[in-house]
Amino acid sequence: MRRFTSPLEPTIGIRHYLLGLVAILIGVYFLGGALISLFISAKLPAGETLGALSNPKDLFSKNEFFSLNMIPFAFGILAIVFCSRLIFKRSFRTFLTARPRFDFTRFFFSFGLWSTLMMVSFFITFIDFNHQIHWNFQSEHFFYLLLLSLILVPIQTGFEEILFRGFLLQLVGKVTQKGIYLILINGILFGALHLMNPEIDKLGSFAIGYYIISGIFTAFIAVMDDGIELSWGFHLANNLFGIIIVTNDWQVIQTDALFLDVSPPTLGWDMVVTMFLFYPLMILVFWLVYRWKNWNKVLLQSK
């Protein structure tokens, strides 16, 4: 099995990962949640209590609420840095890649490839009369959103990639060294993380399948490439597109993006094309560019 998904030190056991997981959860939900509560409390009208508040986002502008939701992810990354130094006693880089240093060329190649495919998909969707996509540019909000997104979305996607395609992938690697099991378990966990998203209520079980397949895809390229550079670049491009290019009024976070899709929630052709055409196409491109070898050894054989 490859160095990135295999635990690097035999003395580091499952208990270390579980202790690290507890530290990460404390950082995200306790510290991050506490800071969010402080910001919400500061915005409350006089005499109103936090417990009586029905919808916190009514207190904030879209940009403010977007920024508020990014706070826990910053604490999550800090928690993983803390774990790498004090619990695992190894470099934070080992949760990112097996290479001597993080490969930004891979990162930006994946980012550019997925951005291009999404723009193609969006152009086709735009001319599809079944979609009602409106120009939504508001200069007083958009440029602020753009600046915030370029700072905060890499943190949000970075945390999710480091947690799922780094930390948890290595944790599961303590139990099984078969890449196929690592990938499937990782995809299911990633899908479970999104069960509370409003898209699930709007689109049903198909949306859960979409998240699981997306998790499997990103775990696959992380395992095959021995690092999260490709998966992080993909994830960043995907989320930036949904935040600054086109948004809707039913996804988990609404923003002042360039375009607003006011179509009713439906299972569009674009989701099917993404899963069964674009994902395999990206795997093919990565395989050709980075010359992945030993597929059988990586996916099916134990260490």
Image (cartoon, grey):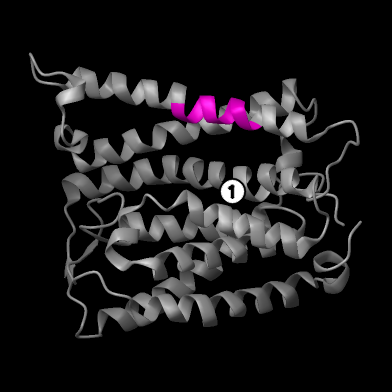
At label 1, counting other C-alpha atoms closer than 10 Å, the crowd grade (few under 14, some 14-19, many 20 or more) is: many
Which quarter of the rendered picture does the N terminus lie within?
Answer: bottom right
- 29 in relation to 275, above or below: above
Measuring from the top left, give residue 41's x and y in whole percent: 22, 19
User: In this view, which residue lies farthest toward the top?
Assistant: 47
Q: How many marks?
A: 1
Main SS category, magenta section: helix
Amino acid type, residue under disc 1 in the picture: Glu
Q: What element carries label 1?
A: helix
Q: Does 25 appear in magenta?
A: yes
| Nearer to us in this view, 176 or 93 | 176
Q: Does 138 appear in magenta?
A: no
59 on left or right of 302: left
Residue located beneath label 1 in the image: 161
Residue 240 appears in the rendering: yes
Which quarter of the rendered picture does the C terminus lie within?
Answer: bottom right
| Nearer to us in this view, 251 or 116 | 251
Measuring from the top left, give residue 79's x and y in whole percent: 59, 27
Q: Name the residue: 88% across, 68% down.
A: 297
